[in-house]
Image: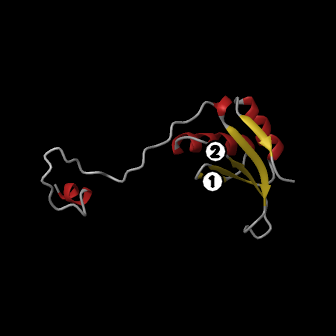
Amino acid sequence: MAKDWKDRLGVVYSTNQDFQYENDIPEEEETLAPQQQDLRVMLDKKNRKGKAVTLVTGFVGADDDLKQLAKLLKSKCGVGGSSKGGEILIQGDFRDQVMQLLQKEGYKAKRSGG
């Protein structure tokens, strides 16, 4: 019961019998097939005190699928990293290895940047 009133904050009363409370829960995007993904692999050093990271951008889909792909890349490269907001960070310069892994998994990946 306590959670019910929190879901409808801002609406006190409605005379419309068909009224439905709207929740601001965003719907998750559907993950595109690997062949339809347009991923960019680049080396990034900005705001990282000169340390290089391999950045994979352009992933369209659910966060769970992004985390699963990031886990695969991190384990195959043997390094740490993170994933959020459609981007995967792999610690170190592993552009060539990441490109090979993505293409092996069926993703369309392009090398971007310098």
- The residue most toward the right is 114
**Percent coordinates x, y for residue 9 in the rendering:** 25, 62
- The residue most toward the front is 16
Image quadrant where residue 37 sits? top right
- Residue at image position (76%, 46%) is 41
Q: Mark 1 = which residue?
A: 82
Label 2 SS:
helix
Q: Mark 2 = which residue?
A: 70
The number of numbered badges drawn on the structure is: 2
- Residue at image position (70%, 39%) is 38
| Nearer the observer, 72 or 63 | 63
Give above or below for 90 relative to 9.
above
How far is the residue under mark 1 from the one under mark 2? 7 Å
Q: Residues within 10 Å of mark 1 (few under 14, many from 20)?
A: some
**Percent coordinates x, y for residue 94 in the rendering:** 80, 48
**Residue flagged by tag 2: what amino acid is it?**
Ala
Of callouts 1 and 2, which one flags the residue occurring earlier in the amino acid sequence? 2
**Percent coordinates x, y for residue 106 in the rendering:** 70, 29
- Residue at image position (22%, 56%) is 3
Locate the N terminus by quadrant.
bottom left
Asked if the residues shown at circle 1 and circle 2 are in contact, with their CB atoms under 8 angstroms apart, the answer is yes
**Residue flagged by tag 1: what amino acid is it?**
Ser
- In the rendered structure, the answer to whether residue 58 lies left or right of residue 15 reads right
Q: Residues within 10 Å of mark 2 (few under 14, many from 20)?
A: many
